Each structure stands twice: as structure tokens, then as C-alpha cells.
Amino acid sequence: AWVVRLDTEGNLLWERILGGEDATDARSVRRVAGDSLVIVGSWGLPDGSRDAFLAKFDLDGNQLWHTTLSEVGDNVGYSVAELSDGAYALGGFSTLVAGRSMLLAKVGSTGVPQWVNHIDGGTGEWEGRSIREDYSGGLVLSGITTSYGNGAEDFYMARTDALGYWVSGPSFGTAAGEQCWDMDLVSDGGYVMVGTTWGAEMNHSSVYVVKN
């Protein structure tokens, strides 16, 4: 994993490399309270599997802490959000169950994991790609599923309580397949998801935007 900070002119201020002999990838970064940075991704292991990880740096590039979430199989972090209580929520996927499940975790402000949870429909493939805290204090994790919807892969948005337990989850898409890559909350209390669709009858992929 490679972490780089640039100044306002695009000049390199510092760079840091995380990981050892096994493949380690950073997927997302957020600036958080206290002028710090939190990075999320996957940490390669000698047996070829991966653990989801979070690492926190100050703005000078000093690593403050690093934590991994270890379960059987692959566990990959795609997104991180700072929560109102100062902790962090991670969203990604896990192969702990058959296929892939959405992975949610909460890590305290000092890097101590507080809980790990999973969302899946019992079958098919699920991935969490973007996580946010919603207006009620619960979590929203957007991504993809093959278990519900119109066929192939569809957008899926999981709403959970503050402990990561599923509350509701609509799917959106066409029979041709979609990939959801990001999501955010909007001022009217709704959500916007963006990604790719192959269902626009154009013989190629198109941008797909959904507001819920």
C-alpha cells in the first residue's frame, strides 16, 4: 500500500509504504478530526489470504496506529467513515461465509476493533463499496449483490443499526448488470449511489446514478 501527501501545487510532501512481502492494498482515505488521516484496505498474509486493515497517520506522515480485522478467508476493506462518537466504520467484503458477504466493522478512535458484522442473503455474491453514518446514527453501506434485483449484479444499499445489524436494503438495476462504486447522503435525508450499468442498450457500459 502506498500513501502519498501532496501540497496545493502537487509537490510531494511525503510518502509511506505499508506492508511486507505479501500484497497489501489501500482502497480509501479520509481526513478525520484532529488533522489526521485514516486509510483502509487489505493486508496480504503468507497463505495468500487477506485481512481488512485500518491505519491512522498524522498530517506529517507519522503512523499513529494500525489494526487488522482477521477472519477465515479473504477480508477486504473498501471504504471508511468517521462516526459521530469519534470511532470509524469500515465497509468491504468477506469470504467467511459461502461466496462473499458485505463486511462492516467498527474500530475505536485508538484503533481497537469494537465489532465485526456481515450482511448476505444466504446465497450469491455481496460486496460493500461505500459506507456512511446516516442521520439517525445507523450505518449505510452501498455495494452490489447477485441475490436480489433484476439479475446479474445490482446496486444494493444496506441500512443497519449502530451495531451493524441489517434493518433494510433495497436493490436497483437492470438484467444486464451494474457495479456500484460510491454513495453519499444528501440534505433531504436521502442517498445517492453512482456506478456503472450495462443496461442502457448502447453496447458498452454507461454511468448509472440512483437517488433513494
Image (tube, rainbow, N blue to C red):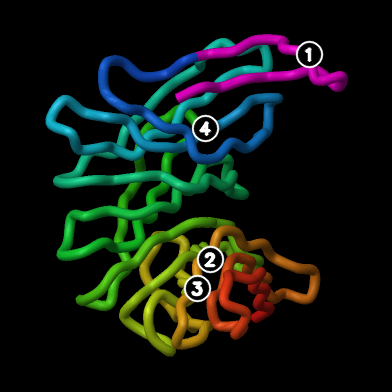
Q: Position of residue 179 (x, y in %)?
A: 50, 67
Which of the two marks, 1 or 4, is nearer to us in this view? 1
Measure the alpha-carbon separation of dots 3 and 4: 26 Å
Q: Position of residue 114 (x, y in %)?
A: 35, 44
* Label 2 secondary element: strand
Check disc 3 and report the residue beneath it: 178
Residue contact at pointers 3 and 2, CB within 8 angstroms = yes
Which residue is at the front of the view, 152 or 5? 152
Check disc 1 and report the residue beneath it: 11
Check disc 4 and report the residue beneath it: 39
Q: Earlier in the sequence, mark 3 or mark 1?
A: 1
Q: Residue 186's quadrant in the figure?
A: bottom right
Residue contact at pointers 3 and 1, CB within 8 angstroms = no
Measure the alpha-carbon separation of dots 2 and 1: 32 Å
Q: Amino acid at mark 4?
A: Ile
Residue range corresponding to the magenta coloring: 1-16
Which quadrant of the rendered structure holds the C terminus? bottom right
